[in-house]
Image (tube, rainbow, N blue to C red):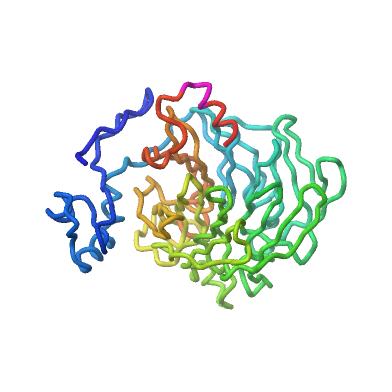
Amino acid sequence: HPARDVFPRAAGMVPRASFALVVAASCGHCLCEHSASSACEAGSAECADVDDIAQLQMTRGLRRREEYDDWEIRQADGSPNKREEAAAFTYGNDLCLFGGREWQPIECLRGTTWKRFNTWTDNLHHVHPIFYDGLLWIIQGWTGNWLDERDIDRIRIWNPLTDQMTTGKLPDGRDCWIPSQYRTGAGGTVEYNGNFYLVSGASSGHLQSVGAYATKRFVKFDPTSCTWTNMAAPLYERDHFQAVLVQGHKLIAAGGRWSSFSSNDNEAISHPTAPSEMYDFESEGDGWVRKADIPTPRGGCANVAVGKYVYVSGGETDRGNDKDWANCNHPSSLKWYANREVSRYDVETDTWDVMPEMVKGRHAHGSGWLWHGGRKMLRVAGGVECAGGGTELESAEEWILPIDDSPGIPFWAPPSLLAASAARA
């Protein structure tokens, strides 16, 4: 399998360099990779020994950095409102930012222009929106300032066509409050077969000293009746992460942390949750199943599902070693940059790969995948550059996904097909 050229980017983007495809195949009783040995290159059934294979697997992620393109800052007209502890959703082929501390507008990056809607949120943060049936739903989150963070008690629904947000009401006008036992923030939410599922999170903010505690639970919400039902509890305490649905029925929880683990307030980001876990809606009897540990455990990350993969970008830990006393000088900053790492989880092989790093470290940001020139790309926006608080970012970054991450739509697909696919995304 010789090196081959990758199709160039759309107009205005720097053409990408060619890269060599690394091919893994089953050779008898072991795993061999292209160029791992002359025997494998020759197509022989003989492969490298077990030690060689272990070394190949250890270095697999490092090679990924060389194979793929780098992230690029998206040059745009204008900039979004600075915000932290916000979230993102995709609307058409736009990445939109929602919520965050203080007053924040809903803003979408359309092409190279930021569009601002008239609707603003009032200190609504640590949310995870669900865009369903033309409406944006919020069923968990916090309000209030640091050390006085409170769980929201009513759902929110935003209609992008009318640019109106309702609080505590279903679309038909009936009241919809969140029962006290199901209130949480910084958790994950997904939609499956018309129901919403709330995964873990934390109640009453970050710190144990002010009454915060982990909400290790799994709850089904019926948006037609505002009914809440307990499901099988997850395996691990986990907040400051995002849940995603892979291949239509596999709920993956990866990244995050246990913010309220310690009574020491200085350790709110010190206890990341390393194991991933999966709940398969088509095998509900199995409950939650532990999956591979994320290579760089961290909270405050943004997760996106693309095909059989989960991409986890950014985050923050207390183990930073890239200190920047000039930029990270906010009173609540920990004086080092947030994570630049991007990790990719393969749900079929239960393995993680290391992807190219973002240009800037960021946490408390939003992300999503969009179409770009017939290819899928990841876009991230907003968030905070330094671990802790402060140094809020106005920039957005993009990364074109590898061809094998963009199944279903060929690169030569007509614009009408791409537009229809984007509308369904």
Q: Residue at x 63, y 60 (%)?
A: 199
For the view shown, which residue lies furthest in the bottom direction? 263
Q: Which residues are magenta?
A: 414-418
x, y (%) of residue 9? Answer: 35, 29
x, y (%) of residue 37? Answer: 15, 56
- Residue 379 versus residue 147: which sits nearer the camera? 379
Where residue 375 sits, quadrant-wise, is top left
x, y (%) of residue 369? Answer: 50, 40
Quadrant containing the C terminus in the rendered view: top right
Secondary structure mostly seen in magenta is: helix
x, y (%) of residue 253? Answer: 54, 60
Q: Residue at x 49, y 21 (%)?
A: 415
Where residue 217 sits, quadrant-wise, is bottom right
- Residue 292 versus residue 396: which sits nearer the camera? 292
Q: Residue at x 85, y 40 (%)?
A: 172
55 versus 261 height, above or below: above
User: Residue 313 colored magenta?
Assistant: no
